[in-house]
Image (tube, rainbow, N blue to C red):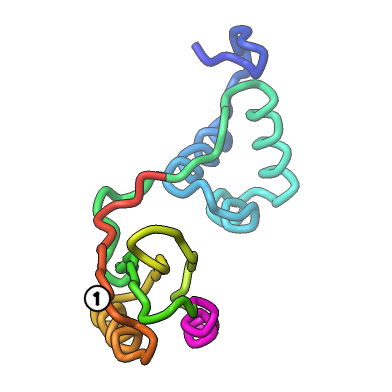
Amino acid sequence: MAQDNAGRPNRLRLSEVDRRILGLLQQDSRRTISEISAATGVSRATVRDRIDIMREGGVIRRFTIEMADDPPLENFQAGAFLHLELKRPVCRIVYSAIRAWPELMGCWSIAGDLDMVIRLETNSTDDLERLRDILCRHQEVKTLKTLTILREWC
């Protein structure tokens, strides 16, 4: 039995229109009130009221999305961290050469064996390679190592 938002048993009786609204929302929770109204043949005000009543009554707990395990290829993104060792300590010069790149997600000067870490997010590995090649040819870059991101956890 469904429960309301306070966890009490739900006594709301669902009409056929309510069931059709729920079915449409289960197929696509982003449907607009107008779309649901057109599909069910009832007014937008009625759809809005019925959804509000079902939310308040605990029939609808939340609206959510379901993501694909493997995103479509057109949404493919290639991300990488580029580790740079510079010929001299001039991170500011290298940064000024790349700061307008829309693919630039982060750039850090660091202490240690490396001088800079750059985070890029591109639409393809070809784009990633093109940007990497530009950086490799920068006059201040001594070495560049690419660490490709396989999966982002958080």
- Residue extending farthest to the front is 88
Q: Is residue 57 left or right of residue 141?
A: right
Picture quadrant where residue 73 is located: bottom left
Residue at horizontal 59%, vertical 8%? 9
Q: Secondary structure at mark 1?
A: helix
The residue range painted magenta reads 91-101
126 is within the stretch colored magenta: no
Residue 130 x %, y %: 29, 86
Q: Is residue 77 visible?
A: no
Q: Residue 132 at what x, y percent from top left?
A: 30, 81
Left or right: where 46 falls relative to 21: right
Of helix, strand and loop, which mostly describes the magenta segment?
Answer: helix
Nearer the observer, 144 or 129: 144
Q: Nearer the viewer, residue 27 or 143?
A: 143
Q: Is residue 121 left or right of residue 7?
A: left
User: Where does residue 119 sit, x and y in percent of width and height?
Assistant: 41, 66
Asked if 22 appears above or below 89 in the picture, the reply is: above
Number of other residues with Cα within 10 Å of mark 1, as a class: few under 14, some 14 to 19, many 20 or more:
some
Residue type indicated by callout 1: Thr
Q: Which residue is mark 1?
A: 125
- Foreground of the two, 70 or 143: 143
Determine the residue positioned at 45% across, 45% down: 65
- Residue at horizontal 33%, vertical 89%? 134
Residue displayed at 51% across by 37% down: 22
